[in-house]
Amino acid sequence: MGVADFWKLSSTVDRANLNSSYFTDRQDRYLRFRSHTEFAQYCRDFLHRSSTFSYRLLPPSPQSSVPYDLHWPDPHTHPHHLESKAKRALTELQSAWVAKSQARPPPSKTEVLLFPVIQAGQFGIREEEQAFGLIFDRLTKHRTDDVSMSPTVDLTSGYFGLSKLYQSFVLQSRVHTQLLCASPEVRR
């Protein structure tokens, strides 16, 4: 499928990620950090690392009939064989940031801790699954039959689908869990 074919497909199919509105007027694609420079730097580093194995969307050449041109940045890696490069880039990113976080003083009781995790099974990275496993394992140890005294897990996402693995975390732990999931039907 060529770029022009993809563009035609994306503007005619009524699905969230293939809808033409997915590419325009998307306010959820912009982030603004006002007071957390460290997290902003992590996001910048993530985007920089990801750009080494991502197409670049460029303005079309004057003779082009499509609304944009795609450019692959790495002449040594074919786009269909980027898995090891992507895994290495993202693993190095996470390792560097884990080392930085371990060098920081412990947080105060009023601070909120953010732990960016990457779930990219196609690259062999399953940090989110590992984190959820650890969280549910830990919370299971503190679970009681009295819901008011037991920990509660709230899971929500606009793209959230509860995989079999996550279902097993919830059901086997018997931790009180509240789920908010996207509708199975996507509409404009």
Image (tube, rainbow, N blue to C red):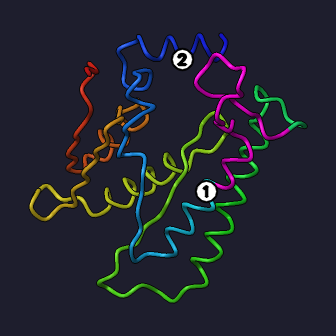
Element assignment for label 2: helix
Crowding at dot 1, Cα within 10 Å, few <14 / some 14-19 / many 20+, comes out as: some
Q: Quadrant of the N terminus?
A: top right
- In percent of width and height, residue 42 lies at 56, 65
Residue bounds of the magenta highlight: 48-74
Residue placed most toward the observer, 102 or 172:
102
Q: CA distance from mark 2 to mark 1?
A: 27 Å
- Secondary structure that dominates the magenta span: loop
Q: Is residue 114 left or right of residue 185?
A: right
| Residue under numbered circle 2 | 7
- Image point 18% across, 61% down: which residue? 150
Q: Compared to 136, does 160 lie above or below?
A: above
Picture quarter containing residue 101? Answer: bottom right
Q: Amino acid at mark 2?
A: Trp
Q: Compared to 82, does 177 lie above or below?
A: below
Q: Is residue 123 magenta?
A: no
Q: Is residue 171 left or right of residue 82?
A: left
Picture quarter containing residue 46? Answer: bottom right
Q: Amino acid at mark 1?
A: Phe
Crowding at dot 2, Cα within 10 Å, few <14 / some 14-19 / many 20+, comes out as: some
Of the residues under marks 2 and 1, which one precedes in the sequence?
A: 2
- In percent of width and height, residue 93 lies at 67, 60
Q: Compared to 155, does 98 lie above or below?
A: below
Identify the disc placed on residue 46.
1
- Image point 73% across, 41% down: which residue? 53
Q: Compared to 111, does 97 lie above or below?
A: above
Residue placed most toward the observer, 42 or 135:
42
Picture quarter containing residue 108? Answer: bottom left
